[in-house]
Amino acid sequence: MKKSNFKWVLLFLGPALLALLTFKIFPMLYALIMSFERYELKNLGFIGLKNYIRVFHDASFWQSLGNTVWYVAISVPLTLIFSLMLSQFLNEKIKGQNFFRTTYFLPYITSLVAIAAIWKVFYDPSSGIFNYIIQSVSKGQGLKWLEESRGVFQLLFDPKAKFLKGFFGGPSLALFSIILMTSWKVCGYQVVILLAGLKNIPITYYEAAKIDGASKVKQFIHITIPLLSPAIYFLITISVIFSFQVFGPIYIMTGYENGGSPAGTTLVTAFYMYKKAFRDMELGYAASMAFIMFLIILIITVVQRKIAEKKVVYQ
């Protein structure tokens, strides 16, 4: 590159690079240093790997990690499946198509605080709309929703908790309720991405499949899914990354003091780090958990990429 061109590159990229270094790179490096220190208000000093060793002996951390894994394992496929169904529906020639597209995208651009607060009211065991619908339709007893600590698998298949206990009982109904809310909110963004992918699939593929007698289900499996694989891979990757960092819905729907309730079944790792850093003021310990989570997310992303290289179909 010529020196004259380099000056222009530096001129245009300089502000963005400065902002990246100031608000991303330097804080990350400083957090890494903090993770090897006793970084509290009164106790400062280098302690080596003690914070990391403490993490691996922290029962609350493992509980929060288990809750986070359940959150990711359910919210990512649930949101993607729902988004695929909606995008396929909205891709058809139906009346009011633009209205439906706008309606499904609105939750994504609406404030998370507002949505979480409204859904918290919906989940109220005594006056919430969900229990009102359940009791009106089945005339049965309503659910505790955000106050239920038992796992959804346990509630469905093993109410007496003879076999399904702890992690194997599944995410608590409280955590599953939060998953439903976040999936509904994020769905609009995924629908937009998938709709763009559907519009890029040549109609000739479907016409040829019809001539061969392929049903719509076979067309969806053998044409739509393979040709949507780049968009699906992108959505899965970013969904996994952001789901591991879930914080806002837990904070808003369970509160600051009782965050993670009931019985710690909604305590996710990001919220646990927040409590350790800003309630207990153990910033070094919280930083060590953050870098452990960074490594977990990095490993999962690399594995996803290795798998996707063989599965993703590019036209």
Image (tube, grey):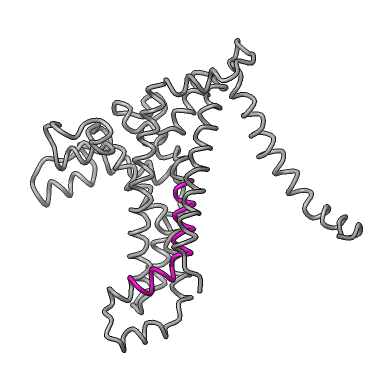
Q: Nearer the viewer, residue 247 or 155?
A: 155
Give the residue at x 36% y 87%: 208
Above or below, 231 relative to 183: below
First to last magenta residue range:
221-241
Q: Which of 207 and 276 is in front in this view?
A: 207
Is 309 left, or right, of 100 in this rendering? Answer: right
Give the residue at x 36% y 64%: 84
Give the residue at x 35% y 77%: 92
Above or below, 157 relative to 166: below
Residue 207: x %, y % from top left: 36, 86
Q: Is 223 a magenta residue?
A: yes
Viewer can see residue 261: yes
Residue 31: x %, y % from top left: 62, 29
- Quadrant that contains the N terminus: bottom right
Q: Is 273 a magenta residue?
A: no
Above or below, 213 relative to 56: below
Residue 235: x %, y % from top left: 46, 57
Viewer can see residue 278: no
Q: As drawn, which residue projects farthest toward the bottom?
A: 211
